[in-house]
Amino acid sequence: MVTTKLGFSLLFLNLVLYIVVTVESIVSKRSNPIDFIKFSCKSTLYPVLCVHCLIGYANSIRQSEQQLAIAALNVSLSWTSTCASFVKKNTNIRGIKPREHRAMLDCIANIDSSADNLRQSARELHLTGNNAIGEKFDWHMSNVQTWVSAALTYQSTCLDGFAGPQMDGKLKDAIRGRVISVSQVTSNALALVNSFASRHQTTTLNKKP
Ligand SMILES: *[C@@H]1O[C@H](CO)[C@@H](O)[C@H](O)[C@H]1NC(C)=O
């Protein structure tokens, strides 16, 4: 009688343990994509901004460093395009001096080039998927790294145009503020691209016999 009771208790205990473990693994699987984003963003210069930008894409990113980097480039491209529209909208406002107008046109050209590079980078990063190994992976990856770095350079060239005294006031601050945010988001994207690149290299190295 006592043994049966004990048997039942053990059985019950096992069942409870089983349920607890199962529920726990489901919960941790669900929270993983967000933890993954938070963890990966620690390697960037602006981690808070990084998490803020990418958390909405957790479902498509899951645990993939490649998808994470692509999402970061997508976000950077979208911020860059919005910034370009803002500058374009303000090039012909009244009272603007010819020098200011020129700086804005230069900035627009730079921001547009930077958007082209980011668009191309996101497309190229797709090519580093499952089938790209070894040299092929390295080739696509180095293209992506070159183009994202170039995008950053174009953005800072735009900022240079507003560094001097030729432009004062609210509009200059508004443009500078936007371009600075855009380059922070792009810098984060580059960091995520670089960490995907370096980790993939270690994995392929480790796989070699
Ligand atoms: C990035 O943008 C492309 C093109 O708009 C889209 O097809 C893709 O799903 C996006 N990827 C992520 C991870 O957000």
Image (cartoon, rainbow, N blue to C red):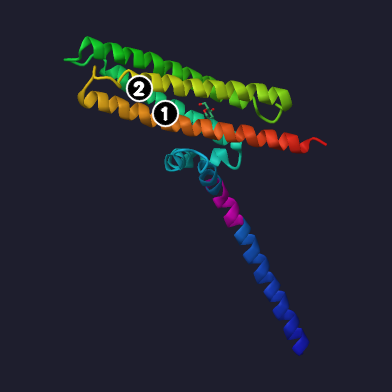
Label 2 amino acid? Leu
Residue sitting at 37 percent across and 25 percent down?
82
Relative to 24, residue 117 above or below? above
Asked whether, in this view, residue 101 is left or right of residue 126, the answer is left
| Figure quadrant of residue 208 | top right
Quarter of the image for the N terminus: give it.
Answer: bottom right
* Residue bearing mark 1: 183
Asked whether, in this view, residue 200 is left or right of residue 40, the answer is right
CB at mark 1 closer than 8 A to ligand 1? no
Query: Seen from this angle, which residue lies furthest front?
Result: 164
Relative to 199, residue 113 above or below? above
Instruction: Choose between 114 and 198: the one closer to the eye.
Output: 198
Q: Are marks 1 and 2 in contact (CB under 8 Å)?
A: yes
Local secondary structure at mark 2: helix
* Residue bearing mark 2: 159
Instruction: Choose between 174 and 167: the one closer to the eye.
Output: 167
Quarter of the image for the C terminus: give it.
Answer: top right
- Mark 2 surroundings: few (<14), some (14-19) or many (≥20) residues within 10 A: many
Residue sitting at 65 percent across and 63 percent down?
21
Q: Position of residue 34 (x, y in %)?
A: 52, 47
Q: Which residues are magenta?
A: 26-34
Q: Position of residue 23 (x, y in %)?
A: 61, 61
